[in-house]
Image (spheres, rainbow, N blue to C red):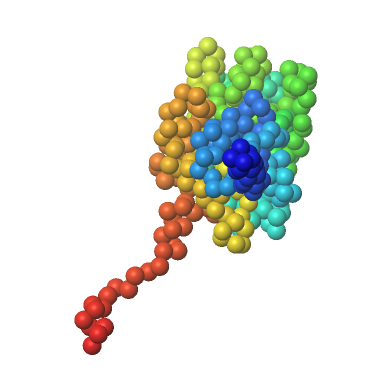
Amino acid sequence: MRKLKSTAFIAITLLASLSVHAQTDEIKLGSGGPKGNYFSMANDIANYCNDNLSDASLSVLNSGGSVDNLMGMGNKIYSVGIVQEDVLNYHAKRSPRKVNKNRLKVISGLHEEAIHLLIPKDYQPESAKKGWIDSLFEDKKAPKISLSMLKDQKVGSWGGSIVSSEALSYFFKLNLKVIDIPEDKRAQVNLPLILVGGHPYKPVEELLQSGRYHLVSLNYHEISEQAGFYSKQVVNYQINGKVTGVPTVGVRALLLGKSFRKASRNTHMSELATCISDNIADLADDPDTNPLWASVYDFIEDEGQVDWSYFPLLEETAATTKPQQPAYQQSEDELSE
C-alpha cells in the first residue's frame, strides 16, 4: 500500500511539473547569422537573463538580420529582435502604422557599427568631370566628402548593408541605385561600396588589401544635421602600409521588443531590460561573452539614450505604481478625538 501511495505521489509531482513547464512562455528573439555579432550577443543575453524571466524562457533564433527581425516582430514570428537604428527609422518613415513607438520599444541599446564608404581608385561618376577621383586623393589621404557627391549614382552593397544604403539614400535624397553584389562578383565590381559592420570589418580589410579601393572619410556634422541618430566614429585600418584613422559615422544596434497596451503583458520586456542593465559590467568583463559588450557598457554607464521609447526598468515600474503616502499622518489620539 505504501509503495502504491509513493508511486502515486511521484506521478502527481511529475504531472504538476509538466503542467508548470507547459505554462512557460517562449520568447523568440530574432538575432542574425550564426557567425555574426547579433547572434553571439543574443546568446549572451539568454545565458545571463533566462533565470530572471518569470515563467518564460528566451529562445535565440538565426535570422536574416535587422530587416528580418523588424518584419518578424510585425508578423508574430519574433517577440524580440536586434535592429539597427537607421533601419528602424527608415521603416518608421515608410510604414508608420506598423513601425512606431507604441508598438515597438527599446529593451536596451547595444553596440555601434560603422558605415564604410569605399570608392574604386579608377572610378569616375557619370556626372563628374574626368579626374574627379584623382583630384580627391592626390594628397594620399582620405578626404571628407559630401554625400551629395553620390547623388544619382549606382552603389554596391550586400547583406544587411543594403538597407543601410537605402536609408542613407532616403534621408539625404540621394536617389541611389543600390546594387546587391553576389559573393562571386565582389572581387571584380567597379562601383562605390557602402558596407556596415563592426570595425575592423573583414570585408573592408580585404578590399583595402587588394589595393583597388579608397576608404572615404564621411562628414559627420553634415550628416548629423539631417539625421541625428548617426553617431561620430573613427575607424582604423592599414592604408598605404600604416594604420590610419578614417572619420565616418556609425549606427547603433538596438534590442527591441513588442509593446502591448496592457502593462502586465510587457513585464518580460522590463525583466530583460533590468537584467541587462544590472549585469552590464559582468557582460563586458566576462571572457566568454562578445567583446562588443565593452562598448555597450560605456553607452549604458554614460546614460546614453536613443530617440525611441524604452521599456521601463522594474524599479521604475515599481516607483510609478507604489501607493503614495499622505504627507501628514494623523496620530491615534487625534483620530480618537
Q: Quadrant of residue 98?
A: bottom right
For the view shown, which residue lies furthest in the front direction?
Answer: 1
Q: Does residue 86 show up?
A: no
In the figure, is residue 125 to the left or right of 331?
right
Q: Identify whether 107 is placed above or below 103.
A: above
Q: Could you tell me which residue is drawn at 48 percent across and 43 percent down? A: 275
In the figure, is residue 213 to the left or right of 296?
right
In the figure, is residue 13 to the left or right of 274?
right
Q: Depth check: 224 or 63 in front?
A: 63
Q: Quadrant of residue 184?
A: top right
Q: Could you tell me which residue is drawn at 51 percent across and 48 percent down? A: 271
Total marks shown come to 0
Q: Could you tell me which residue is drawn at 57 percent across and 54 percent down? A: 266
**Where does the N terminus fall, quadrant-wise?**
top right
Give the percent coordinates (x, y) of residue 249.
Answer: 54, 36
Q: Depth check: 257 or 298 in front?
A: 257
Q: Does residue 329 show up?
A: yes
For the view shown, which residue lies furthest in the top direction?
Answer: 241
Give the percent coordinates (x, y) of residue 188.
Answer: 76, 18
For the view shown, which residue lies furthest in the left direction?
Answer: 333
**Where does the C terminus fall, quadrant-wise?**
bottom left
Q: Identify whether 292 is placed above or below 2.
A: above
Q: Identify whether 112 is placed above or below 92.
A: above
Q: Depth check: 239 or 133 in front?
A: 239
Give the percent coordinates (x, y) of residue 133.
Answer: 65, 25
Q: Identify whether 231 is placed above or below 34.
A: below
Q: Depth check: 306 or 19 in front?
A: 19
Give the percent coordinates (x, y) of residue 69.
Answer: 68, 41
In the figure, is residue 135 to the left or right of 154?
left
Q: Could you tell me which residue is drawn at 64 percent across and 21 percent down? A: 203
